[in-house]
Image (cartoon, helix red, strand yellow):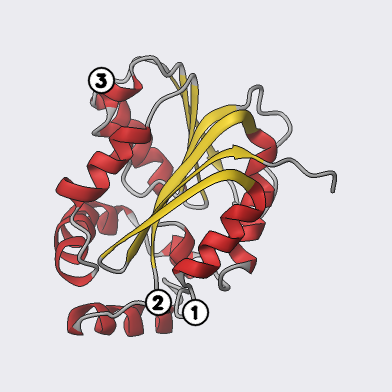
Amino acid sequence: MHPSAQIYTKLVLKLYDFIVLSISNGYAWRCPTQTTLLPFSREHAGGEAHLDVGVGTGYYPANAVTHLARTEEITFVDLNPDTLEVAESRLREAGYKGRIETLEHDVFLPLPTSMHKRFDSVSLFYLLHCLPGSFPAKSAQVLHSLIPAMTDDATLYGATILGEGVEHNWLGQKLMDLYNAKGVFSNIRDSQDKLLASLKERFEEVEIRLVGVVALFVARQPIRRVE
């Protein structure tokens, strides 16, 4: 398992919301969870079938249950079985009544053809900056894997911490150096322009806005190619 996924033990997951969603988001990345990331997630959550990739603790779907009331199925995809277990349990405890599927899978690889339906929405929160490699290559590979499983009108949305073309504060730079050295992050050369170019290659409509050092992105209507 890659270090970016292996780090999320059950103990770390118990501390994740406080360390990442409260401290790091607010003070290091300057993109607050409660006032920015959660409203952004709620705004785009929905559709008949939803796919969440890189699930963390399941915080975002669990806190958007009312926006997912008409969503019949939510599928969690992650390399780490502990995160999948925690996310599924949290979503069910939050009151979600639909079907929940979990898949231990590498997002660089195509999703299994056995998945019985395409997804109307796909969320990637804090996944891309953890993946090995740099934009646009790693983001292009992720899109290559996910687009075949998306409907023609699907929306892909998420957030990623940038390392290039942004100004990190003292705490953010210390965390960037530490996480990249340990392989938890791989985002030193990830920039907004490179992400935008990658998304525009595979979607008809793309929007990106920068909050602190975090890029919030929305991409609609995937472009299918004959590979």
Residue under numbered circle 2? 163
Q: CA distance from mark 1 to mark 3?
A: 40 Å
10 Å neighbourhood of mark 3: few (<14), some, or many (≥20)?
few
- For residue 171, what is the image quadrant? bottom left
Q: CA distance from mark 3 to mark 2?
A: 37 Å
Residue found at x 31% / y 30%: 91
Give the structural element (helix, strand or loop) at label 2: loop
Label 2 packing within 10 angstroms: few (<14), some (14-19), many (20+):
many
Which tag is nearer the camera, tag 1 or tag 3?
Answer: 1
The residue labelled by disc 1 is 189
Does 171 sit above or below residue 72?
below
Identify the element where label 1 is drawn: loop
Task: Write down the residue under mark 3.
Answer: 95
Depth check: give the residue in front, 179 or 79: 179
The amino acid sitting under disc 1 is Arg
- Seen in the picture, residue 202 relative to 73 is either above or below; the reply is below
As drawn, is 168 to the left or to the right of 156? Answer: left
Residue 59 visible, this orientation: no
Q: Position of residue 106 (x, y in %)?
A: 60, 53
Whether residues under marks 2 and 1 lie with C-beta atoms below 8 angstroms apart, the answer is yes
Q: Is residue 54 visible?
A: yes
The earlier-in-sequence mark between 3 and 2 is 3
The picture places residue 57, in percent across and down from the top left corner, at 31, 46
Residue 72: percent from left, percent from top = 45, 16
Quarter of the rendering occupied by the N terminus: bottom right
